[in-house]
Image (cartoon, rainbow, N blue to C red):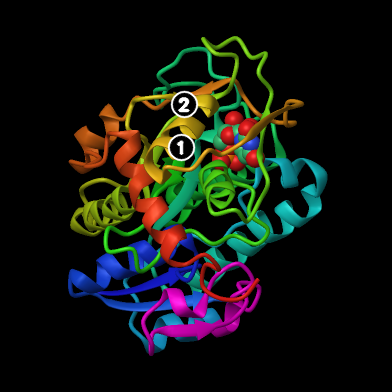
């Protein structure tokens, strides 16, 4: 099988690329390197390009006899999406539409898509099941929901088989510490806290401590990036095996089922790094629901997927190893 990984030089993409290669797939990475890193992918598989260039993309799919697409390319910061929604609709929605156009032209009929817990908005019930109504409360969540709907419609009309994987909070780094998280600017909690541990920032700001949670800070379900990679592999196999009479569509949550507050994450980072990590109280960040925790049982049932990392300290340990050994990430800031 030949797999085209869109956005494969990014955080979750690069971990998935590595796993697919280990499993013996022919893997091609298509990335514009705006958020991705050349050093995050093995030499020889990277094709630099824009998603808007659907003619070139379909050409690449035909030439390389691509059977499956895995699509990671997106902007993914909740706060930024509230400030700059145009950037999010352009990059996430318009570009994904272009990708689907290329797939139809090249007759590629399988796609694994990075969706998100942010499509649920403020859930009626936690842990969140897939039957929960999807009512996003920020532009980022809306952009991902629009793409999910496009996939449903394309499945119905064009026979596109898809998996929409709704990630909770991706975290950690590869166990050998060679690839990890490097966003610029960084907006995610664990890398920011570990940058404080490294002395690169003075403190971490806690965005709100008056939420209706036990310690007042937001609760999230942190899932290891290598576990997300495994889920992509399982989803791809499930769609491919389907070929005609099996699963045409998969829509599942990917989380551990365990929630941790912002304060607990900071505490875990103090424990693992051995550094003090000053924190300051700040205002709530626009677009943040109080509690997002997955019920991952459907992913287990449909994909046979279960996270190997269920302990927050173990997840933070892998992140710490990456940040400690690569204080500048993939290169100079
Ligand atoms: N957060 C925080 N300070 C920061 C960054 C994040 O308190 O500097 C909080 C944020 O409000 C959310 C949680 O940490 O409740 C996880 O945020 P992140 O941006 O990592 O992921 P998201 O939940 O937005 O996908």
**Vertical order, 112 against 105 (above or below):** above
x then y, percent, for residue 157: 47, 51
Query: Which of the two discs, 2 and 1, labels the residue nearer the N terminus?
Result: 2
x then y, percent, for residue 115: 49, 45
Tell whether position 208 is magenta.
no
The magenta stretch is 32-56
x then y, percent, for residue 294: 39, 27
* Residue in front for this viewpoint, 66 or 105: 66
According to the image, label 2 marks what residue? 264
Q: Residue at x 65, y 29 (%)?
A: 288
Image marks 2 and 1: residues in contact by CB distance under 8 Å? no
Marks 2/1: CA–CA distance: 10 Å
Q: Is mark 1 within 8 Å of ligand 1?
A: no
Q: Write down the quadrant of residue 216 in the picture.
A: top right
Identify the element where label 2 is drawn: helix
Question: Which mark lies nearer to you, 2 or 1?
Answer: 1
Tell whether position 53 is magenta.
yes
* Residue in front for this viewpoint, 123 or 302: 123
Quarter containing the C terminus:
bottom right
x then y, percent, for residue 213: 55, 12
Q: Residue at x 48, y 69 (%)?
A: 6
Number of residues whose C-alpha sits closer than 10 Å to that of mark 2, classed few (under 14), some (14–19) or many (20 or more) = some
According to the image, label 1 marks what residue? 270
Left or right of 321 on screen, residue 187: right
Identify the element where label 1 is drawn: helix
Q: Quadrant of ligand 1?
A: top right
Please state the total of marks drawn on the protein image: 2
């Amino acid at each position: 099988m030949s797999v085209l990984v869109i956005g494969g030089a990014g955080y979750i993409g690069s971990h998935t690329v590595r796993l697919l290669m280990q499993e013996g797939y022919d893997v091609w990475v298509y990335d514009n390197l705006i958020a991705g890193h050349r050093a995050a992918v093995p030499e020889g598989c990277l094709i630099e390009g824009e998603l808007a260039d659907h003619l070139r993309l379909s050409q690449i799919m035909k030439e390389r006899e691509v059977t499956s697409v895995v699509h990671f390319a997106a902007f993914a910061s909740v706060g930024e999406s509230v400030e700059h929604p145009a950037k999010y609709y352009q990059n996430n929605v318009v570009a994904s539409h272009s990708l689907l156009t290329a797939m139809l032209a090249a007759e590629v009929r399988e796609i694994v898509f990075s969706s998100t817990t942010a499509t649920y908005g403020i859930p009626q019930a936690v842990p969140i099941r897939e039957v929960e109504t999807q009512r996003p409360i920020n532009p980022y969540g809306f952009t991902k929901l629009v793409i999910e709907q496009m996939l449903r419609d394309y499945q119905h009309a064009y026979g596109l088989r898809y998996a929409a994987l709704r990630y909770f909070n991706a975290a950690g780094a590869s166990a050998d510490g060679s690839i990890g998280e490097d966003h610029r600017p960084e907006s995610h909690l664990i890398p920011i806290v570990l940058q404080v541990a490294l002395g690169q920032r003075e403190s971490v700001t806690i965005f709100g401590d008056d939420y209706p949670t036990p310690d007042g800070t937001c609760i999230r379900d942190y899932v290891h990036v290598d576990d997300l990679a495994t889920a992509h592999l399982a989803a791809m196999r499930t769609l491919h095996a389907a070929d005609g009479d099996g699963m045409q569509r998969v829509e599942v949550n990917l989380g551990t089922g365990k929630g941790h507050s912002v304060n607990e994450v900071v505490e875990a980072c103090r424990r693992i790094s051995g550094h003090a990590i000053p924190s300051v109280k700040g205002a709530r960040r626009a677009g943040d629901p109080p509690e997002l925790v997955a019920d991952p049982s459907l992913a287990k049932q449909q994909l046979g997927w279960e996270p190997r990392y269920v302990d927050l300290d173990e997840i933070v340990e892998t992140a710490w190893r990456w940040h400690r050994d690569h204080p500048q990430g993939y290169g100079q800031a």
